[in-house]
Image (cartoon, rainbow, N blue to C red):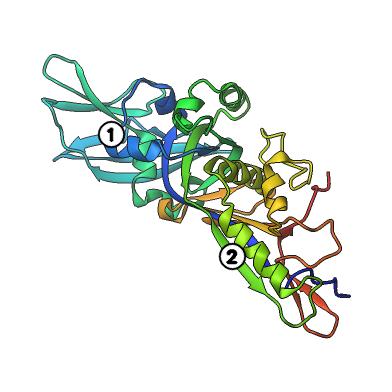
């Protein structure tokens, strides 16, 4: 490949990666339940949310039994209409005055406990049994979350993603569509905290740069002295993940990011960053995320070239000193072919 000119000896990338997370199904999200203090603390810092779906799970009532503070039986779910079953056996003590446990009425999605007055004490969703036990590790279809929508809930910084989602019109549309078109599936929402970005630097001394060392140093100090705001970072994460996954319910950024017309990139261009790298990690959850545009994986790295429309080398380009360039694979450069 014929080499492009090198503008600077060094090129810099904004690298933003996910940290803590929370996961809930849509039913729990819409309920009036109260988060535990530790969950609330994380929730308040999660401003990126990912709406996904998994197979809907229920107990098979005729096999479910409760003995010696353990509940066992079979879980049922469907994949493209095909009924599947997996056995389970977990500890489940009766607490808070409960004297009995039994499967709820159709569609048998909960195990309920009752006191001696017949009042329900607590319940255990079948989905929690599957998600919270080793069962799903043996069944790929229970591990892979299809990404339907990516959004952000930053605003003025005082609303968490969960609080915003409860009244979000797109989520209501997704819930209605899944119920109508994917009755065997259930919607889950994952929210992510993103920590302050890192600056990654790549230096290439194999070719002569157009700009002087002094200009290169001044640019670096400008990057350090003019940090991106928290809100700018969240906007960049949202746009990058939408472009990377191409979720079916997103419209903005799905096919057009990056572009100099996007205001959220203005500061990146002003500071002359040449790349954006956004990571999302679900390895700790042992879940994979996927869409038609992104293969199932527990750790996704979205690499975006911000100077692809210019005649210059980017962060993802390397030279051999003989006039040839080598580009890293799987780098997003511009509009998606549609």
Q: Mark 2 points at which residue?
A: 200
Find numbered disc 1 in the image and state the secondary structure of the residue it sits on. Answer: loop
Residue at image position (61%, 22%) is: 173
Q: In this view, does 131 lie above or below 113?
A: below
Q: Quadrant of the N terminus?
A: bottom right
Q: Which residue is nearer to you in this view: 50 or 127?
A: 50
Residue at image position (80%, 72%) is: 6
Q: Name the residue under label 1.
A: 36
Residue at image position (54%, 30%) is: 155
Residue 74 seen from this side: no
Task: Pinpoint residue 300: horizontal percent, then vertical percent.
Answer: 57, 56
Residue 216 seen from this side: yes
Q: Quadrant of residue 90?
A: top left
Residue 203 horizontal side relative to residue 18, left or right: right
Residue 240 horizontal side relative to residue 71, left or right: right
Q: Quadrant of residue 14?
A: bottom right
From this viewpoint, which residue is outermost toward the bottom?
A: 322
């Amino acid at each position: 490949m014929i080499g492009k000119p090198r503008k600077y000896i060094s090129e810099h990338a904004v690298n933003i990666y996910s940290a803590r997370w929370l996961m809930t199904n849509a039913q729990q999200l819409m309920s009036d339940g109260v988060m535990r203090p530790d969950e609330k603390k994380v929730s308040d810092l999660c401003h990126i949310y990912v709406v996904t779906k998994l197979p809907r799970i229920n107990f098979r009532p005729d096999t479910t039994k409760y003995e010696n503070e353990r509940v066992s039986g079979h879980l049922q779910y469907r994949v493209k209409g095909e009924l599947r079953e997996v056995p389970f056996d977990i500890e489940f003590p009766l607490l808070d005055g409960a004297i009995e446990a039994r499967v709820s009425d159709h569609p048998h999605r909960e195990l309920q406990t009752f006191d001696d007055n017949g009042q329900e004490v607590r319940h255990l969703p079948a989905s929690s049994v599957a998600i919270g036990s080793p069962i799903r590790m043996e069944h790929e279809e229970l591990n892979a979350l299809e990404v339907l929508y990516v959004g952000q809930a930053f605003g003025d910084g005082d609303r968490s993603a969960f609080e915003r989602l409860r009244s979000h019109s797109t989520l209501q549309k997704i819930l209605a569509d899944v119920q109508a078109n994917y009755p065997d599936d259930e919607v889950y929402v994952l929210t992510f905290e993103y920590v302050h970005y890192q600056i990654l630097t790549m230096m290439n001394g194999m070719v002569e740069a157009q700009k002087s060392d002094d200009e290169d140093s001044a640019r670096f100090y400008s990057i350090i002295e003019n940090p991106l705001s928290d809100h700018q970072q969240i906007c960049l994460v949202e746009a990058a993940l939408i472009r990377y996954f191409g979720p079916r319910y997103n419209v903005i950024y799905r096919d057009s990011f990056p572009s100099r017309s996007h205001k959220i990139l203005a500061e990146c261009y002003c500071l002359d960053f040449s790349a954006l790298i956004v990571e999302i990690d679900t390895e700790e959850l042992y879940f994979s995320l996927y869409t038609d545009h992104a293969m199932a994986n527990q750790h996704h790295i979205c690499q975006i070239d911000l100077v692809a429309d210019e005649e210059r080398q980017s962060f993802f380009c390397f030279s051999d000193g003989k006039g040839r360039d080598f580009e890293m694979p799987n780098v997003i450069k511009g509009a998606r072919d549609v």
